[in-house]
Amino acid sequence: MRPFWLEQALQGDASPTCEPLQGDTRCDVCIVGGGYTGLWTAIMLKEQNPELDVLLIEADICGAGASGRNGGCALSWSAKYFTLERLFGVQEAVRLVKASEQSIHAIGAFCQRYGVEADYRLDGTLYTSTNLAQCGSTDSVIAALERHGINSFDKLPVAEVQRLAGSSKHLEGWFSPAAASVQPGKLVRGLRRVALQLGVRIHEKTAMSGLGEGSPAVVETAGGKVRADRVVLAMNAWMARAFPQFERSVAIVSSDMIITEPRPDLLKKIGLTTGVTVLDSRIFVHYYHNTPDGRLMLGKGGNTFAYGGKMLPVFDQPSPYAPLLRSSLNEFFPDFAEAGIAATWNGPSDRSVTGLPFFGRLGEGSNVFYGFGYSGSGVGPCHMGGQILASLVQGLDNEWTRSPLVNGPLGYFPPEPIRYLGSLMVRNAIRRKEHAEDRGHRPRRLDVRLAKFAAAAGKADKG
Ligand SMILES: Cc1cc2nc3c(=O)[nH]c(=O)nc-3n(C[C@H](O)[C@H](O)[C@H](O)COP(=O)(O)OP(=O)(O)OC[C@H]3O[C@@H](n4cnc5c(N)ncnc54)[C@H](O)[C@@H]3O)c2cc1C
């Protein structure tokens, strides 16, 4: 089953098919993985250096991973400010928050420049509270952003929050204009189209089955070998299984999504008429936005955990959490109680210990680079990932190659079975805590303490 967004994008995608690799070939740069990270890297390399021969291989079709199925909320790293400051210091944290906002705008400019119709709407985001326990939880990070002159958020009166968000479930809200919503499948397929236009050679249905390090590096596939001066691994959640050294650097966890049939009449009735993205302040956040064709999409993170980082068949099936999503939808939007559901789906997110992606090379002096660990927040940040990887590949000396983001994983989860059992314990504690808070009850102290393990990574992650 293809997730809803990708299916919709494929219907309007007239760009040529990219045949599987047959036979051996040579290139300057081989990119493995056709999601946002791989495609942004390919495009930036060609824009900066049109002479480079760039070849991209994708195991399925471009957009089959998280990039073709996510929530389409393009957000900055403002909400991660404390994590950034703790890990990298004030100066780099400030730079990264600004760069993450620039990426939101750059995605819009890219779509305009190349005529990519990805339903990009720069209509901002609302970070809200949907129960009393959440109220005030955003204040400290906004105060820190303000102190450093990088705050784009304004607290809105409750009535205005409820009007903008189309739901009376919100008790407070901060609005930032520096955020966009997109149709993620159309964005990734648009990136593919532009990459082809710029001369990137793409082979779909071509999985890397082995990697021989050396100069050149040799990427093995069923149909032939690719010899490449440099290799970029942009495989996201698949990295954990493919390279044992990364197994404990991420936990693979689903985010689950539901989308209604078009009901522009109901959207108009509730007042949700812009492309604003709305996120509450749970650890496993609720996030939603409308679509230009009158649908309402709602997602929720932190559901299915994969033992040992395995890709589970359930990630390519309708969401097992469909009833929960439906009831959340009804709670936020009682007017949609009778609205038809067009689809539910889910997909794997690569949650790192810090909630931030990490980049690097496979070993000292290696010509194989990688980047992943976006932790359910990659629509905007993958554009930064493209800048980082394109800079690393070209051996540039700039703010990206000097950034501590290129120092590899910044933490490891415990080995299995502890990671899996621990994840479930924390997830269930969060569920109990948030359930109690929704009912105005005080959560158990142990649940609060366990929940802190997940909260440490920062707000607004959708994995
Ligand atoms: C359900 C869901 C909802 C999300 N919602 C949001 C959101 O609203 N906002 C937000 O900012 N982020 C969100 N995210 C996160 C975001 O989608 C990701 O961070 C981002 O798409 C990662 O892009 P990527 O290119 O690194 O990985 P992917 O898009 O996953 O691409 C990796 C690609 O590598 C390919 N591959 C794997 N192994 C091989 C191999 N051996 N050979 C060749 N190719 C291979 C895969 O087929 C895949 O296409 C969400 C994620 C999920 C799963």
Image (tube, rainbow, N blue to C red):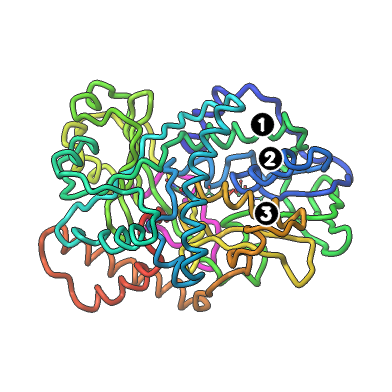
Question: Residue visible at 79% across and 38% down?
Answer: 50
Label 1 beta carbon within 8 A of ligand 1: no
State the residue in front, 76 or 208.
76
The mark that comes first in sequence, 3 or 1, is: 1
Position of 196 relative to 394 (above/below): above
Residue 127: x percent and y percent? 29, 49
Mark 3 vs mark 2, CA separation in Å = 11 Å
**Picture mark count:** 3
Mark 2 vs mark 1, CA separation in Å = 7 Å
Residue tagged 3: 389
Question: Residue visible at 54% across and 64% down?
Answer: 309
Q: What kind of residue is marked 2?
A: Ile
Label 3 beta carbon within 8 A of ligand 1: no
**Side of 206 where 428 appears, left or right:** left
**Side of 435 where 362 appears, left or right:** right
Position of 384 relative to 245 (above/below): above
> Which segment is the magenta one?
301-321
Q: Residue furthest left?
A: 440
Q: What kind of residue is marked 3?
A: Leu
Q: Residues within 10 Å of mark 3 (few under 14, many from 20)?
A: many
Residue tagged 1: 194
Quadrant in the picture for residue 235:
bottom right
Question: Residue visible at 46% across and 29% down?
Answer: 119
Quadrant in the picture for residue 20:
top right
- Residue 298 seen in the current view: no
Position of 200 relative to 384 (above/below): above
Question: Residue visible at 67% across and 57% down?
Answer: 398
